[in-house]
Structures are given as C-alpha cells and as structure tokens.
Image (spheres, rainbow, N blue to C red):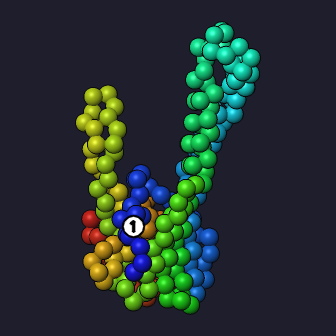
Amino acid sequence: MIGDPGQFEAIGNRLGFQIVEQSPQKLRLQWQGARFPAFLCLGIALLLLFVSVPIVQALQLRGFVGPAAALWYFPLMNLVLFGISIYLITQRRMIVFDGTAHQLTLRRRSLYRSIMLRAPYGEIASVKLAVDQVYSGFALGGSTAAEKFAVPALRIGFTSGDDVLLDRGSFKKLAELGRLVSEQIAKPLEIDPQLQS
C-alpha cells in the first residue's frame, strides 16, 4: 500500500460519491465537493464586487483619509470569500477499482495539493458496512457541543490492520455501493448486525 489511509477520513459526516464508470473491469466513483457553500460564497463575493470596486477606486484617489477609508475591509472580505469559493469548488475525491491492474486508487484533490493512496487487491482483507460515531461539532440552544451520533459507513480493511473510509450515508445506498465494490474485488461484504436490525 502506498499512502496514508488517515488522509481519507471525512471531515463532515457524509460524502455522497456518484458512480461515474461501471464495468466488469473498472468501477470509478467521484465526489464533486461542497457545491452549495462554494457557489454561495462565490455569489456573495460577486455581489460584494459591486461595492468593493468603487471603494478601491476611492482609496486609490484619496487614500485612507477620505470617506471610503472606513470601508477598507470590504475589498479584503471580497477576496477572502472568493478564495474560499475557489478552494471549495476545486475539492474532488475519486475512488477507482481497476480490475485489469488489480489495484485500488483513492485520490483527494484540492486547489493546493493532491493526495493519493494505492493498494493492490491482494492487500485488501475486507469490505465492511458498519457504524461510525461522528461528532456533530455544533452547540445550539444550550446543547452539549461535539455530541456523537451514529452514521453508516463503508470501509475497506487492509491486511496491515488499517482501514480506509470509502463513503458515509444512508444504509440502502451504501449497501448497494458495498455490493458493487465486493463484486469488483471478489471479497464478501460484511454488514454490522446493528445496521440490519
């Protein structure tokens, strides 16, 4: 195995991979990133552009002594939102099960880096559909911060004892995805009894 399985743990509780290519030789899954917050930040940045351009022009003409001097943070806020939106738009994750090379490839890309994990099918020990305990991370209305809740997760276990997260989501969707993965690598799908009840 080349790469670190810990680099592929999800920050949020769900990913939602889509099947891009499915054949007896290859199964390719892709996650496009957080689209809604990305386009929300981009929309706000474009709206702020109508305010920021006149402020920048006023600052160029009169410096920080004119009436626009108190609004210097608008162009800065616009740049930050634009940067966040570009970062979110460029995030992608891809999982490829290549039957001809008998190899699993996980790739995580963003604006500034790309991380890859490769493992031959011989190093894969199991395909597990189990429950992950995920922190909520939010405290609302006096609730306790960082409470855990159970989320179904599809993982691949390696002979080294490590495992890597493929996806989190609904049981039905993950059971179908787990069946496709287990067929591709010729390993049985292990389902946690908690999820079957």
Q: How many numbered badges does the structure rendering display?
A: 1
Is 54 displayed left or right of 5 in the figure?
A: right
Q: Is residue 51 above or below residue 137?
A: above
Crowding at dot 1, Cα within 10 Å, few <14 / some 14-19 / many 20+, comes out as some
Residue at figure coordinates x 52%, y 80% from the top left = 97
Quadrant location of residue 6?
Answer: bottom left
Is residue 48 at all visible to an observer of this figure? yes
Q: Which quarter of the rendering shows the N terminus?
A: bottom left
Residue at figure coordinates x 61%, y 24% from the top left = 74
Element type at mark 1: strand
Residue at figure coordinates x 31%, y 48% from the top left = 135
**Front-most of 69 and 149?**
69
Residue at figure coordinates x 33%, y 42% from the top left = 137
**Front-most of 146 and 116?**
116
Q: Which quarter of the rendering shows the C terminus?
A: bottom left
Is 74 displayed left or right of 146 in the figure?
A: right
> What residue is shown with label 1?
165
Q: Position of residue 153 (x, y in %)?
A: 37, 64
